[in-house]
Image: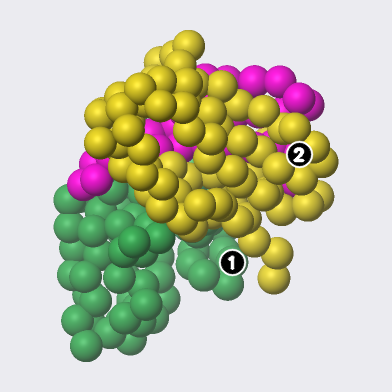
Chain colours: A green, B yellow
Amino acid sequence: DAKTTQPNSMESNEEEPVHLPCNHSTISGTDYIHWYRQLPSQGPEYVIHGLTSNVNNRMASLAIAEDRKSSTLILHRATLRDAAVYYCILVNTGNQFYFGTGTSLTVIP
Amino acid sequence: EPEVTQTPSHQVTQMGQEVILRCVPISNHLYFYWYRQILGQKVEFLVSFYNNEISEKSEIFDDQFSVERPDGSNFTLKIRSTKLEDSAMYFCASSEQNAWVNEQFFGPGTRLTVL
């Protein structure tokens, strides 16, 4: 499975932006970069995904480096509800999703 | 808003017994998945299912596991002879298109406890 590296944990103050980094130096040309999150005691929840260009949706933005070896998930204004484990996942044409250990985000009121 | 549902929310069984975990994916979705998460560990992919057949499976998905779409709405995971190490949270997911390029919607999970 394609490997990603994320910090184990991060903290953010409420209502401030959060930048969650992910390194994926062995990414292949057809790998999509997906982000999911898992709130406590819930199933994973889709956040965003992209291939090469930066992406925005109602939840977040995804900034992808030009060489695609890293990406950053941006939450524009963190809320308490955003406290979760965030997973950066590389997905190829197969349907296998390999969740790593992710980044545990703590939001401080 | 449509959602994936799973039943039961908690299943307790004796080691060696068969269990069937049930999922109702979102109605217009074509791709279905099972994952498991042992307490305190990461989410692990088990199997993906499309067009009435398995499209991908992980090493975890051995002969004791099977999946079925018995009718137009349900998607089931069967564990034939449960082991203690099968105790975990099992999540079902579905997607409209291949999850490579599309979002997956996850259910709330079934907690399986094997005694």
- Which of the two marks, 2 or 1, is nearer to us in this view? 2
Residue occupied by mark 1: A57
Residue occupied by mark 2: B30
- Main secondary-structure element of the magenta-colored stretch: strand
Q: In the image, is residue A54 above or below residue A106?
A: above
Q: Amino acid at mark 2?
A: Leu
Whether B15 is among the magenta residues is no
Does residue A68 appear to the left or right of B92 in the view shown? left
Marks 2/1: CA–CA distance: 24 Å
Instruction: Look at 31% across and 81% down and name the residue there.
Output: A80
Where residue A72 sits: x, y (%)?
Answer: 37, 54
Q: Secondary structure at mark 2?
A: loop
Does residue A59 appear to the left or right of B114 in the view shown? right
Chain part drawn in magenta: B29-58
Instruction: Look at 64% across and 20% down and name the residue there.
Output: B54
Label 1 chain ID: A
Where residue B14 sits: x, y (%)?
Answer: 32, 33
Q: Secondary structure at mark 1?
A: loop
Where residue A89 sits: x, y (%)?
Answer: 42, 40
Question: How crowded is the residue under tag 2: few (<14 C-alpha within 10 Å), some, or many (20+)?
Answer: some
Where residue A39 sits: x, y (%)?
Answer: 36, 64
Does residue A107 appear to the left or right of A56 in the view shown? left
Question: How crowded is the residue under tag 1: few (<14 C-alpha within 10 Å), some, or many (20+)?
Answer: few
Query: Do we see residue A46 in this rendering?
Result: yes
Label 2 chain ID: B
Q: In the image, is residue B107 above or below residue A106?
A: above
Which of the pair A73/A85 is nearer the observer? Answer: A85
